[in-house]
Amino acid sequence: VENGHELVEVPVSFALTRLNDLLKNPESQDKFPARIRYYIRDVKLEIHPILKVYPAQISGIISTEEEMELFNKYINGNNKVDGNLYFHLGLCYEELKEYDKEMEALEMAVKLNPSEAHYCNILGTLYRNRGEYNKAEEILKEAIKLEPKEWSNYNTLGAVYRDKGEYDKAEEVLKKAIKLNPDEWINYNLLGATYRDKGAYEEAIRILTVSYTHLTLPT
């Protein structure tokens, strides 16, 4: 109990999401103590440690530039950090189009939280965008190992194989993406483009027709 209020341990991401939702509600805003509503502006981390991990991750209150500045100030202040902080710092850099720094932040996020498949997926996408296909393939295979039922991991890996000209491998993983999520048109679209690139035009037409009509392929 702190200041008459019972504190309950919950995941940090849940706490911040809940706080953010409440702050968006005009009827709830005035019910929050000022030190919670405005602590991120001057980095007065006086609240319970459960929220100290993210000194700036309450969207809509400050600008991306201010948020990024506070993230870096927090990291450089020898505070305890985890992969989630670097992940959200990377999102700030993405909005500011500072892509090298975005990748560095995502690499640190994966280093600190290597079991987080979502971070691996995004980092793989960043590597692919930079043409670093071997790195992209390696980290996306790790994402698949961590979350073998997540279709987007196979989709992104398929895009990497297509970029490398390894069309058979691309076809294999994209079919897995379709099997996991038969309603996602982008899987069909990418597989159709792969067939087109390898010269299998009839297959390309068939699969792209499915893409545009959002139909599931017959078994």
Image (spheres, rainbow, N blue to C red):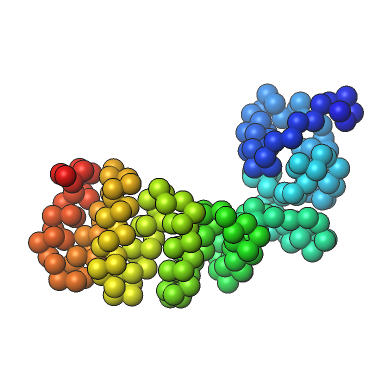
Screen quadrant of the N terminus = top right
Tell me, yes or no, if residue 145 can be seen here: yes
- Towards the viewer: 6 or 93: 6
Q: Quadrant of residue 114?
A: bottom right
Q: Residue at x 44, y 57 (%)?
A: 144
Task: Give x and y (percent) for residue 64.
Answer: 64, 55
Q: Residue at x 19, y 71 (%)?
A: 198
Q: Quadrant of residue 104?
A: bottom right
Above or below, 51 relative to 63:
above
Q: Spot the residue most to the front.
A: 145
Q: Residue at x 28, y 48 (%)?
A: 179
Above or below, 201 relative to 208:
below
Task: Give x and y (percent) for residue 36.
Answer: 79, 37
- Towards the viewer: 16 or 1: 1
Q: Spot the residue most to the left.
A: 202
Q: Residue at x 64, y 53 (%)?
A: 84
Tell me, yes or no, if residue 98 can be seen here: no
In the picture, measured across the screen, residue 30 lies left or right of residue 167, that is right
Exactly how many numbered labels are in the figure? 0
Q: Quadrant of residue 170?
A: bottom left
Screen quadrant of the C terminus = top left
- Towards the viewer: 4 or 158: 158
